[in-house]
Amino acid sequence: MPADDVAANLVDVRARIARAAADAGRAAGSITLVAVSKTHDAERIEPAIQAGQRVFGENRVQEAKAKWPALRARYRDLELHLVGPLQTNKAREALALFDVIQTVDRERLAVAIAEESWRSGRRPRCCVQVNTGEEPQKAGVAPAEADGFITACRADHGLDVVGLMCIPPHDEPPAPHFALLAKIAARHGLAGLSMGMSGDFEDAIRLGATHVRVGTAIFGAR
């Protein structure tokens, strides 16, 4: 995709965010666009950076490790979110790379992040991923177990839990899943709601999303 197309797509996505925010009676500035750059190389990402985008998401630690250190050396104000599953044995690399880990979903991972935070002195912001559709093939803590897990992450492991994240089932309307995530977050006084992707982020904004994860609508099909 030409650089001009990436920049134009960013303009369009930002306009859609602003319209959805206005329709919901919210300020567009209260919503962070996370540009999901998984599978796209630095050459395709850089036009987005040059167009002013500063927050990016990646799915895999190894892929991020291959392209982001050089980009961050050139652009010091970037923020990087891990939006894909994290293996416990990758916790050390993840903390070295990412500012935010959006996919904390099990006790062993919470422990690994806590131990690495103590060792390295780096304390990433975290989101607990909730499997709102209770899909067996998908990562995330079950809704019925979310309250206990969120409490444990904060009280027992000292994680900096700033919000929740979900990926609704692709074959169901997303709004009930977004509403469920917001309800769980409210019980814990968590302001952050990472929900909504290229096909449904307007619905997510209407239901309180603070972060929307948009890849295809910016960078094109993978």
Image (cartoon, grey):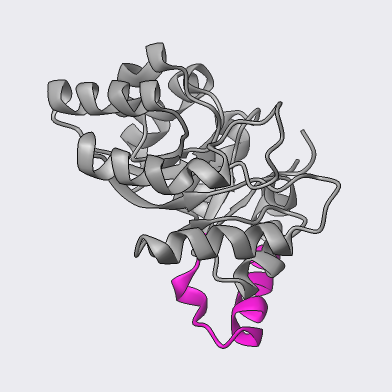
Image position, residue 180 (x, y; %): 60, 60
Q: Residue furthest right?
A: 171
The quadrant in which the N terminus is found is top right
Q: Is residue 204 magenta?
A: no
**Residue 101 to residue 93: above or below:** below
In the image: residue 131, left or right of residue 136:
left
Q: Residue at x 20, y 28 (%)?
A: 117
Q: Is residue 218 above or below residue 108?
A: below
Q: Position of residue 206 (x, y in %)?
A: 64, 75
Q: What are the residue bounds of the magenta stretch?
A: 11-32
Q: Position of residue 30 (x, y in %)?
A: 45, 73
Q: Is residue 16 covered in magenta?
A: yes
**Residue in the picture at 81% in, 45% down:** 170
Q: Is residue 142 left or right of residue 158?
A: right
Residue at 86%, 47% in the rendered image: 171
**Percent of width and height locating residue 213:** 59, 51
Against 28, is 75 above or below?
Answer: above
| Residue 79 visible to the viewer | no
